[in-house]
């Protein structure tokens, strides 16, 4: 079974538009895998979106570099995110994410993941933008929330991890009850997660290999994201 097949099974995807290879250090502006639901029928598709949301009304696609993440607390009110939140929600599969802890003059990177090393779904919203030549660009922003217990001494924000039981609700473009949707955007249960320090190799976008996500204490390896 291929990596894409495994993701399709876990996220109940029927259509796969891409071929996936392991990623260990995804940088802003690069493409990432995302699960979306067809607005016409209850079927899901696995495809690629560029990380950094570009609103349909934007004049310059470089605005996406300022819109990598969206705060869940203001998602309903922000014009740049409001419409996407209503009907263009997605899941970004990952089995870990990085955050940096400031220690004196240094910043120590950590990998955060599930205790059982399983893949999980990050809450995302996506948009389509058309350039002057008529070419469409599809982009995504990852939602963030306050930190849970395993994150709070490292950073004051964390990505929203959607519970598997909530995948159907989150992905349904026809569901528009913002109060219910916002209630899903909570810090994930810290008791189900673990973290470990990784090499500062991950600080450079030129590196995208297993060493980026290997524990500096045990030398173990873990995919940082898919």
Image (cartoon, helix red, strand yellow):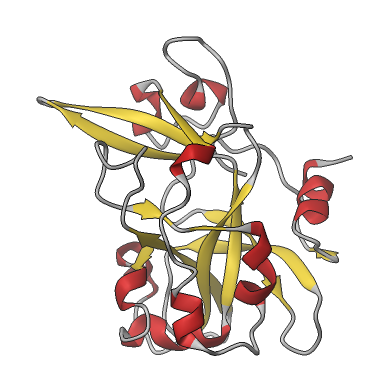
Residue in view at x 41 percent, y 53 percent: 28
Would you place residue 33 above or below residue 132 in this image? Answer: above
Q: Position of residue 46 (x, y in %)?
A: 73, 62
Residue 183 as seen in the image, left or right of residue 6:
left
Q: Nearer the viewer, residue 61 or 116?
A: 116
Quadrant in which the N terminus is drawn: top right
Q: Is residue 132 visible?
A: no
Quadrant in which the C terminus is drawn: top right
Residue in view at x 46 percent, y 29 percent: 207
Would you place residue 97 above or below residue 210 in this image? Answer: below
Residue in view at x 44 percent, y 32 percent: 111
Would you place residue 149 above or below residue 117 in this image? Answer: below
Give the farthest residue toward the right: 1
Q: Position of residue 117 (x, y in %)?
A: 62, 33
Q: Position of residue 199 (x, y in %)?
A: 38, 20
Residue in view at x 42 percent, y 75 percent: 54
Q: Position of residue 171 (x, y in %)?
A: 64, 74
Quadrant assignment, res 40:
bottom right
Q: Nearer the viewer, residue 160 or 90?
A: 160
Give the farthest residue toward the top: 218
Residue 170 as seen in the image, left or right of residue 109:
right
Give the farthest residue toward the left: 104
Quadrant assignment, res 45:
bottom right
């Amino acid at each position: 079974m291929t990596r894409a097949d495994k993701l399709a099974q876990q996220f109940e995807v029927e259509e796969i538009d891409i071929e996936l290879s392991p990623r260990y250090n995804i940088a802003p502006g690069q493409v990432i895998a995302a699960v979306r639901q067809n607005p016409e029928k209850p079927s899901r598709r696995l495809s690629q979106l560029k990380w950094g949301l570009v609103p349909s009304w934007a004049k310059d696609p470089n605005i996406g570099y300022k819109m990598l993440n969206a705060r869940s607390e203001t998602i309903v009110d922000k014009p740049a995110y409001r419409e996407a939140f209503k009907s263009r929600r997605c899941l970004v599969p990952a089995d870990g994410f990085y955050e940096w802890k400031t220690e004196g003059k240094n910043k120590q990177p950590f990998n955060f993941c599930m205790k059982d090393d399983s893949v999980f779904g990050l809450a995302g919203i996506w948009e389509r933008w058309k350039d002057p030549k008529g070419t469409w660009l599809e982009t995504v922003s990852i939602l963030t929330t306050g930190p849970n217990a395993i994150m709070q001494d490292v950073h004051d924000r964390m990505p929203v991890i959607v519970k598997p039981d909530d995948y159907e609700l989150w992905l349904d473009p026809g569901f528009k009850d913002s109060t219910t949707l916002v209630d899903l955007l909570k810090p994930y249960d810290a008791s189900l997660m673990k973290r470990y320090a990784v090499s500062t190799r991950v600080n450079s976008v030129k590196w995208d290999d297993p060493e980026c996500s290997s524990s500096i204490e045990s030398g173990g390896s873990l995919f940082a994201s898919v």
